[in-house]
Image: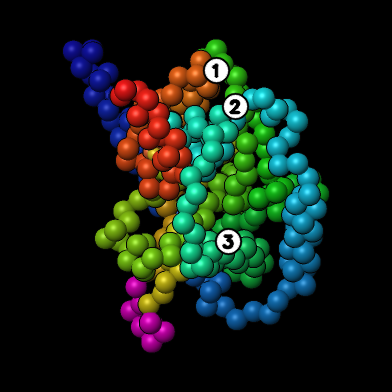
Amino acid sequence: MDQLFSRANAQRLKKEVTEQVSERGKFLSGKLYNSLNTLHVTDYYADVEIEKLLLRQKEIEVQNITKPHLPPEAKGMVYFSPSGASKCNRELYFKAKNCTKDEMPFYPYHKRWTRNGTAIHEAVQRDLLYIEKYVPDAPFKVARNDKGMPMWEETIKTYKVIEHDGVQFGLYGMSDGILVHQEDNTQVGFEFKTKSTTIGAVGNYKMKDAQEGHKIQCTAYALLFGIYEHLIVYESLAKDKWTANENAKLDLRVFYHQVKPEDVNALLDKCAYITRCVETETVPPKESDKCLFCPYKGICEEVDHEENK
Ligand code: SF4
């Protein structure tokens, strides 16, 4: 009976905790969604202080162009990046081994596709700074480092050496930003993604939650920056027609994601497994559902061919 009681209690507690999390998730994602929308209907002039800050940030980025891509401690070490955290184990193995990539056909519209995504990243970071100054009772501020710079991209680029399951590997990366929730002073990760195909890609029907790969990316941020709550924003670069007005289809979505200890363990296990594979020259099994953007299809086929001889 005691056992039954405690199991029921545990289930009730779990339900309460989950509901609390989702209530907070709804609250935080709603706040960010509303503040972006409020800014986007506000008429404001360029703010000299904000624009100067962004210029200083650009200066840092330009200075970093000629600096080595990797810090010295990364030398000879297998390392992973947040954006690659959900990739196929075999692809990450080929990358760590510095294997030759396929020659991929690249068309002019591909460049326009990626440059549009990059440009809007900068635009939304500018928006965040304008929100904290021009949206009344702004719920979030962009965290600043000790030099007063916004904490995103180059200002938070970090290399961390991790030991897990008897192996050592690196984690290297930066994120789109760290926000401070004004009500309770908690830090929340900000991740921004664009969709370039159709507006339906971010609609309620096709998008019920943040993409799995993007959640795993947040797990890597938890390891790098110690931040477990994240807001993942999706914006469709395709918009509804200008005259749709209040009936315009959704082009912006915000999802809350909380990284759990088991997510962290799963990612650490994955990185340790690949590191061990690299050390023992063991090619990991294929993950054929992840091949679309993989640049190692050629060598992957060669390995299969050798194995099936
Ligand atoms: S082609 Fe597919 S299975 Fe092979 S390494 Fe790339 S993602 Fe993995």
Task: Please report the residue visible at 52 percent of the width from the left and 55 percent of the height from the top.
Answer: 192
* Dots 1, 2 in contact, CB < 8 A: yes
Q: Which residue is mark 2?
A: 78
Q: Are marks 2 and 3 in contact (CB under 8 Å)?
A: no
Instruction: Decide: few, some or many residues near mark 1? Use Cα within 10 Å; few <14, some 14-19, many ≥20.
Output: few
Q: Which residue is mark 1?
A: 279
| Residue at 36% across, 69% down | 199
Q: Earlier in the sequence, mark 3 or mark 1?
A: 3
The residue positioned 63% from the left and 56% from the top of the image is: 141
Looking at the picture, how far across and down is residue 219, in whole percent? 49, 36
The residue labelled by disc 3 is 118
Disc 1 or 2, which lies upstream in sequence? 2
Single out the residue that lies furthest toward the bottom. 243
The residue located at (54%, 64%) in the rendering is 111
Q: Nearer the viewer, mark 3 or mark 1?
A: 1
Residue type, numbered disc 3: Thr
Say whether disc 2 or disc 3 marks the residue closer to the N-terminus.
Answer: 2
* Quadrant (top left/top right/bottom left/bottom right) for the N terminus: top left
